Image (cartoon, helix red, strand yellow):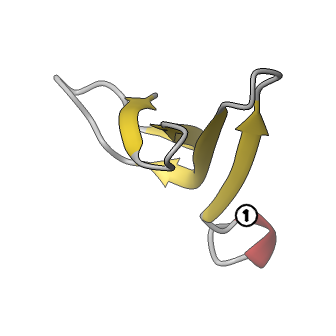
Amino acid sequence: MHANPAYKDRMEARVVEYPDGGKVLQYWSFYYNNPKTYATRGNHEGDWEMAQVHPNPSQEPVAATYS
């Protein structure tokens, strides 16, 4: 099924704006198959991963969070 374009790996991005004028840049990655294992566990199908960057008012990154 991974060869089917409907199930391919993909990347999405968005900007979340806060009422105080701040913002967060979010990057989402979907993996149809995640074969990564740790201590023989973890191999699974369908996985969203996310990273986000927190810029200051000058648009310089000051923090990042990951899932």
As displayed, is residue 47 above or below residue 12? Answer: above
Which residue shows up at 55% across the image and 53% down it? 31
Kind of residue indicated by mark 1: Tyr
Count the marks: how many?
A: 1
| Along the line of sight, the residue nearer the viewer: 37 or 12 | 12
> What percent of the width, then of the height, locates residue 64?
39, 33
Direction front: furthest residue? 58
Quadrant hosting residue 45: top right
Q: Quadrant of the N terminus?
A: bottom right
Give the residue displayed 31% in from the left and 42% down from the top: 36
Classify mark 1: residues with Cα within 10 Å, few (<14), some (14-19) or many (20+): some
Q: Position of residue 30 (x, y in %)?
A: 61, 51
Examine the rendered structure and indicate whether residue 16 appears above or below residue 19.
Answer: below
Q: Nearer the viewer, residue 57 or 18?
A: 57
Left or right of 31: which side holds 14? right
Quarter holding residue 8: bottom right
Q: Which residue is denoted by mark 1 in the rendering?
A: 7
User: Helix, strand or loop at disc 1?
Assistant: helix
- The extreme left residue here reads 39
Q: Residue at x 66, y 36 (%)?
A: 23
Would you say 67 lies left or right of 21 here? left
Instruction: Report the front residue among 42 and 30.
Output: 30
Answer above or below: position of 32 versus 53.
below
Residue 13, position as x, y percentages in the image: 67, 55
Q: Quadrant of residue 63?
A: top left
